[in-house]
Amino acid sequence: MKNRLRAWMNRAAGWLFPRGARCLCCGDPRRASEEDCLCDSCREKLKDWRVPAGACNRCLSPVTRGKPCAFCGSAMMRPIEAVFAPYRFGGETRQLIHALKFDACEEAVPLLAQAMADALPRRDFDCIVPVPLHPTRLRQRGFNQSLLLGRALSSRTGVPVMELLRRDRYRVPQSRLPMKRRADNVRGAFSCMGDPAGKRVLLLDDVRTTGSTACACAQALLDAGAESVCLCVSAVVYRKARGK
Ligand SMILES: [Zn+2]
Ligand SMILES: [Zn+2]
């Protein structure tokens, strides 16, 4: 309810005041151009949150040179062919994503979607499948941020959006759970409602934290016959997986 009210108030503010009067990260009056949602300083700082070149080229986790990637060796990456993301989660990227997710600032979408499009090394996907929200959560929030990002990415890449997944179980939001309980919380929580048979799917979410949500979605798609699943997110939580 609180989220919905906030989302509504943000929309109302958008009607009352000129679009994007303030930087979405620091709140300062901005900005470089009319359509920019950040001030110059935050746009500059955003560059520091790029995924470093030395990250694992399959899952974008930090790796020690000469050692196999611990995250790629974990169960979380088994159903996922590769991960694509422009940013690490933190600082300005956290503020931007939270502005979108919790304050309904849809102005963040074009910036994030463009960065995601730029981070995609290939376009040979049959569809973009956004990670769904449970209907109860969707009613509370009023929108699915992954679907908004998916549509914006679709218009930049020409890959169509297909809403093939459904979230069946309403459980505790992942963000409120400790890392080690997240996989259990989402295991089997998704099912396929369309036919992904033979499709090369680009799964889309806002952030990858532990990877358990993406893993559960990818497994549901593969079980229903998808040929492959890659994951695209706007930011990855950049930390070392615990070694096996
Ligand atoms: Zn700023
Ligand atoms: Zn890896």
Image (cartoon, helix red, strand yellow):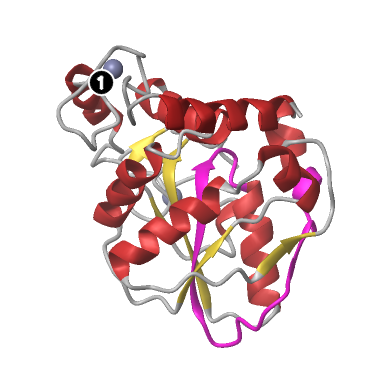
Residue 51 falls within the magenta-colored stretch: no
Q: Is residue 28 left or right of residue 165?
A: left
Give the side of residue 213 with respect to residue 21, left or right: right
Which residue occupies 46% across, 33% down? 105
Residue at image x 65%, y 84%? 195
* Residue placed under numbered mark 1 in the picture: 42
**Residue 101 or residue 204, whichever sits in front:** 101
Q: Quadrant of residue 215?
A: bottom right
The reply, left or right, for residue 48 in relation to residue 139 is left
Q: Which x, y percent locates residue 131? A: 60, 56
Is 28 in front, or is 77? 28
Q: Point out the image quarter for the N terminus.
A: top right
Looking at the picture, tell me which residue is in the foreground, 156 or 121. 156
Q: Which amino acid type corresponds to the residue marked 1 in the rendered image?
A: Cys
Measured from the top left, where is residue 237 in percent x and y? 48, 34
Magenta residues span 184-211
What quarter of the picture does the C terminus occupy?
top right
**Which of 17 and 59 lies nearest the eye of the viewer?**
17
Q: Is mark 1 within 8 Å of ligand 1?
A: yes
Considering every residue shown, the one lying at the far bottom of the view is 198
- Asked if residue 69 is positioned above or below residue 24 in the image, the reply reads below
